[in-house]
Image: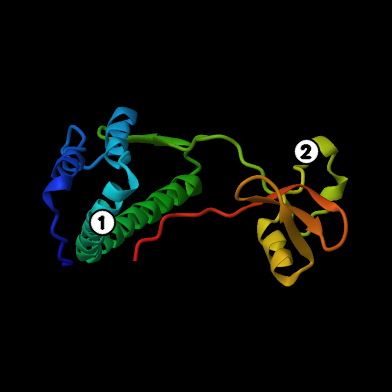
Amino acid sequence: MATLYEITGDLRSLYDLMENLVDENGEPREPTAEEFETMKAWFTENEAAFKAKFDNYCRFIKNLRLSAENAEAEKKNFKAEADRLTKRSKAFTNRAKYVTELLRWGMERLELKKFKTDFFSAGIQNVGGKTIDFESGADFSKLPEEFLMPREPNKKAILEALKDGTLEERPGLENITKVFFKGGDRLPFVHVHQSDALVIR
């Protein structure tokens, strides 16, 4: 299990506030807007004070990430048992399904739509909504337009075209670029967003 960093006194109150972010079951929860504003107040100091506390802030972030890693490691310890129980549950569910199919086969063979004893009753009836299937090799162009869905854009193909140079990005809003065919017209409605994050090493 990873070891947590030492937290100095100037972050103790923030640490305590984070530790108290739990739901009614004692499980970690997200901060409310008001709590988040309280946390932000810790960062509203001048540059010199901020530099003095920077390492402690980073240690605090590392602690939170190490706690997440420890929780993940703990989850993996239980994964084997969870997998075993999942397989066991699936096996019993499948057995019930097979025996149900055998019982139905027996009722259909005897042309019984319903059957009842002193303990149980069973009947073959419609359940759930109707579903649609299509014949193999069906020509969907023969369906009226109202029964066809519009084609959906292929984001992966657009990203590949940007990578190989078929398409190019041009400046747009902050962190967003517009997409054009190389040396040509704009690809309508397509923007590329490049997200960013604070990386602590």
Q: In this view, does 36 lie to the left or right of 195?
A: left
View extreme (bottom): residue:
164
Q: What residue type is labelled 1?
A: Ala
Q: What residue type is labelled 2?
A: Phe
Q: Position of residue 141 (x, y in %)?
A: 86, 49
Q: Where is residue 196 in the image (x, y as percent from the top left)?
A: 50, 54
Measured in 3D between alpha carbons, the distance from the residue under mark 2 to the one under mark 1, in whole angstroms, is 48 Å
Q: Residues within 10 Å of mark 1 (few under 14, many from 20)?
A: few
Q: Quadrant of residue 24?
A: top left
Can residue 9 be seen from the camera position used here?
Answer: yes
Where 138 falls versus 125 (above or below)?
below
Rendered residue at 75%/42% (across/down): 149
Q: Mark 2 points at which residue?
A: 147
Q: Is residue 39 left or right of residue 103?
A: left
Q: Which of 158 and 183 is in front in this view?
A: 183
Q: Where is residue 106 in the image (x, y as percent from the top left)?
A: 43, 50
Judged from the image, the secondary structure of the residue bearing numbered disc 1 is helix
Rendered residue at 28%/63% (across/down): 83
Rendered residue at 70%/56% (across/down): 154
Q: Name the residue under label 1.
A: 68
